[in-house]
Structure formats: structure tokens, C-alpha cells
Image (cartoon, rainbow, N blue to C red):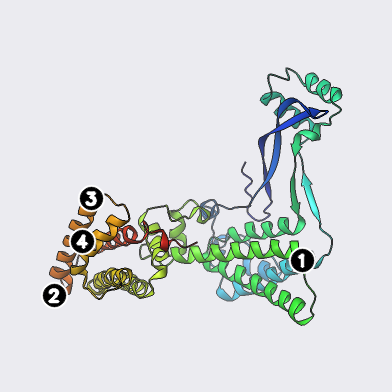
């Protein structure tokens, strides 16, 4: 189910069918398809918000006056950094107060969510045709076995803290301009961390265990999301935060399995995490590409990134040209087929030929499409070297 709202986010739930056993005196009488209600974490699709972005001058509201009166609009794209910082401070202070009160509260404050009796009966009727032909059949069944309609439901159960944190997550997800989301998120987490430290380390009072676990899980999720989006904006094929979201349905759907060029850049940073020298050279290659002034050095650093990766991988000092036999043996040990090994080897030979002819011994890289192709090819070579080896999968 979809539950999208821009400024007043709300938690959604969805219903799934389960199987409930009806027994009497330890004897199984019936199996009925019942219902489980589970939480759906709040997500916002940036493209939906992007379509409504406006400038202050286009907005009939006095945006600055509204802001300093405490009203902040997600869809205004040209707030100044000072205004964003001001908004982040007063909004995160308000969030902090509410979340902190829930964190230190000793009692567990759970909310249960159920469907109406009428809706439950409709579900039961649709899914249990062999037992129920009409609503009256359901009522008679409940009366016969002394059941209540809620016995067929496993309700969603939320700690109030979880609900409020998810509401904040949705509000943060509506920040289409990534640096704004980053400011809001990190400022809120910093304030909460400071409060937790003061409470536990200085005052010596422990937070309730369940509530602290909910907060820490939420905190890790938010920081991980920030880390993933950071990888997007380092892509040489993405030049500002708005354009970035034109190419992806949602930042929440990012995964290393996606293979668009921009995704491949992000994925390459993932696979190079264990190879800092190669990763540094890859970053330099991207920087040169972004400047669009030094394609030769950009391509040269791609080659060096690949060469340093192989040296680390095979623990030797051989040049890229001389690593081909090592690569063949390595890939064979990983179970890569002969045909793919031969394709990889032949591709790497042409890769070396291009580097030698246009980069290593010359400076004749002038075609931007060739540079983009070399980026894509280098990233594919890197992925094929690291990904099949489970040793280097980052958890």
C-alpha cells in the first residue's frame, strides 16, 4: 500500500495472509487463512517531490518570513545555507525534545493496529471459500468455537518511539537536496548522541534497553543511507543533486546489483574498500574527469587503479601487462569459465594497447566518449576481479 504525503508523513501498515489453526482438546479442527498486520517503513520518492520544487520568487508565500516564524518548506530549492542551518536547528530541537522524552520514559508505550471487524470478515470470506460462503457463516463459526473476530489477526505492534522515529525518517527523506538532508540528519543524531552521553556517562543513568536498541537501529539505518547517497554524488556522471534524482526512482532502492553507469561508479567504491591505494587513484581519475580538462591523466589513473588493485590482490610488484597469467590462474580458481577468462584476457590486452598508444607514451585522449568507455570498462574489470571472491564482500 502507498501512503505518500509531503509535509505530514505518517507510518503505513500492510496486511498479509497467515494460517491460523483452530483446535479443540488438542485436536486440530480447521486451518483458516488469517491476517497479519505489519509495519511498512516510511519512504518518500524524491521524484514525486522534485516535480513540485519551486523558487522563493515563484512562491506566493514570503518564504523568509515564514521560515523565521518556524515554518519550513521542503519544496523550496533556493533557501540559503544560513536559512537551512537555522531551520535545521529549530526543527531538530523540536524533534529532539519529543524523542528524548520517549527515550527516557521507563514504561513501554506500545500501539496496536488492527483492521475493522467488517474488513476482517471480508478478508476471511475471500480467502477461506471452503469454510465460509457468507458473513453469517463466519459469525456462526466464531460462535461455535467461542472465538472473537480478532482471534484471526496478528496485529502490528509498535513502540511509540519507533513510530516517531519513522515519522522523522520520512520527513528527512523528503529533502530532495541531499546536503540539506545530510545537515538535518547529522545535526539531529549529534544532538541525540550528546544527550545520551550526558545521561548515561555523566549522570550514570541507563536508558531503557528496548528503547535504546530502537534508537541505535534507527541511527545506524540513517547513517548508512547518508553513506550510500554520498557515493552517488561522487559519480563523474552526476553533476548536481537534482539531476541525480532524475536517474533513480528513489535513493531507498540503491543496491550494488544495479548496473547503470552511475550505479557502477558507486559500486566500484564499494568493491575497492579493501584496496585503499587503488581506491585513491580511482578517486583521482574521477576528479580529473569532472574538471574536463585533463582526460589523459584521468585515464592514466584508471590504469594505475587497476594495476595497484592487481598488485594488492596477488601480493606482487608486476606491471599491468605482466599480470595476465596471474589473472587467468586466479579466475580459474574462482570457477570462472575458460571462455570468460579468455574474453577478460583479450579485453585487458586491448586495454593495455590503448593505454600505451594514447596515454602512457603519448597525450592523444581527446574524445570524451572514449574516456567514458574507459571508465565503464575499468569498472567492469575491477568488479569481475573482486566480486566473485567472497573474501572481499563488505557486510
As drawn, 119 above or below 81: above
Is 156 placed left or right of 300 in the picture?
A: right
Which callout, 3 or 2, points to the residue nearer the camera? 3
> What is the secondary structure assignment of the residue under circle 4?
helix
Are the residues flagged by discs 4 and 3 in contact, CB closer than 8 Å? no
Residue 14 location (% of width, % of height): 66, 41
Q: Which residue is mark 4?
A: 348
Which callout, 1 or 3, points to the residue nearer the camera? 3
Q: Residues within 10 Å of mark 4 (few under 14, many from 20)?
A: some
Q: Earlier in the sequence, mark 4 or mark 2?
A: 4
Spatial CA distance of label 1 from label 2 is: 64 Å
Q: Earlier in the sequence, mark 3 or mark 2?
A: 3
Q: Which residue is mark 1?
A: 103
Q: Quadrant of the N terminus?
A: top right
Are the residues flagged by discs 1 and 3 in contact, CB closer than 8 Å? no
- Residue 338: which disc? 3
Residue 368 location (% of width, % of height): 24, 63
Q: Residues within 10 Å of mark 3 (few under 14, many from 20)?
A: few
User: How many numbered marks are there?
Assistant: 4
As drawn, 275 above or below 253: below
Are the residues flagged by discs 4 and 2 in contact, CB closer than 8 Å? no
Q: Earlier in the sequence, mark 4 or mark 3?
A: 3
- Residue 361: which disc? 2
Amino acid at each position: 500500500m502507498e501512503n505518500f504525503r509531503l509535509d505530514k508523513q505518517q507510518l503505513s501498515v500492510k496486511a498479509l495472509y497467515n494460517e491460523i489453526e483452530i483446535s479443540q482438546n488438542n485436536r486440530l479442527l480447521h486451518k483458516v487463512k488469517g491476517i497479519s498486520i505489519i509495519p511498512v517503513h516510511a519512504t518518500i520518492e524524491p521524484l514525486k517531490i522534485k516535480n513540485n520544487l519551486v523558487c522563493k520568487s515563484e512562491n506566493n508565500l514570503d518564504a523568509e518570513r515564514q521560515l523565521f516564524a518556524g515554518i519550513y518548506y521542503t519544496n523550496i530549492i533556493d533557501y540559503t545555507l544560513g536559512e537551512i542551518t537555522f531551520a535545521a536547528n529549530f526543527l531538530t530541537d523540536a524533534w529532539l525534545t519529543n524523542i528524548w522524552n520517549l527515550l527516557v520514559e521507563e514504561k513501554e508505550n506500545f500501539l496496536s493496529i488492527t483492521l475493522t471487524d467488517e474488513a476482517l470478515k471480508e478478508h476471511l470470506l475471500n480467502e477461506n471459500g471452503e469454510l465460509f460462503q457468507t458473513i453469517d457463516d463466519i459469525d456462526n463459526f466464531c460462535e461455535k468455537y467461542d472465538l472473537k473476530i480478532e482471534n484471526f489477526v496478528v496485529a502490528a505492534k509498535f513502540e511509540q518511539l519507533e513510530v516517531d522515529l519513522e515519522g522523522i525518517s520520512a520527513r528527512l527523506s523528503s529533502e530532495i537536496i541531499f546536503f540539506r538532508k545530510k545537515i538535518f540528519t547529522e545535526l539531529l543524531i549529534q544532538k541525540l548522541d550528546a544527550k545520551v552521553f550526558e545521561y548515561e556517562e555523566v549522570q550514570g543513568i541507563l536508558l531503557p534497553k528496548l528503547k535504546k536498541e530502537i534508537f541505535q537501529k534507527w541511527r545506524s539505518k540513517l547513517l548508512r543511507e547518508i553513506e550510500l547517497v554520498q557515493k552517488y554524488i561522487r559519480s563523474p556522471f552526476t553533476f548536481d543533486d537534482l539531476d541525480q534524482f532524475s536517474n533513480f526512482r528513489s535513493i531507498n532502492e540503491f543496491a550494488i546489483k544495479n548496473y547503470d553507469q552511475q550505479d557502477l561508479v558507486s559500486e566500484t567504491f564499494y568493491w575497492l574498500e579493501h584496496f585503499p591505494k587503488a581506491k585513491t587513484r580511482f578517486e583521482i581519475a574521477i576528479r580529473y574527469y569532472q574538471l574536463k580538462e585533463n582526460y589523459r591523466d584521468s585515464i592514466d589513473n584508471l590504469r594505475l587503479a587497476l594495476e595497484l588493485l592487481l598488485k594488492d590482490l596477488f601480493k606482487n610488484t608486476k606491471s599491468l601487462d605482466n599480470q595476465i597469467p596471474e589473472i587467468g590462474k586466479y579466475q580459474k580458481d574462482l570457477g570462472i569459465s575458460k571462455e570468460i577468462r579468455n574474453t577478460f584476457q583479450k579485453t585487458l590486452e586491448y586495454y593495455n594497447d590503448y593505454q600505451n598508444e594514447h596515454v602512457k607514451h603519448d597525450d592523444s585522449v581527446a574524445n570524451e566518449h572514449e574516456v567514458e568507455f574507459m571508465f565503464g570498462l575499468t569498472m567492469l574489470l575491477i568488479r569481475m576481479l573482486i566480486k566473485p571472491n567472497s573474501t572481499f564482500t563488505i557486510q
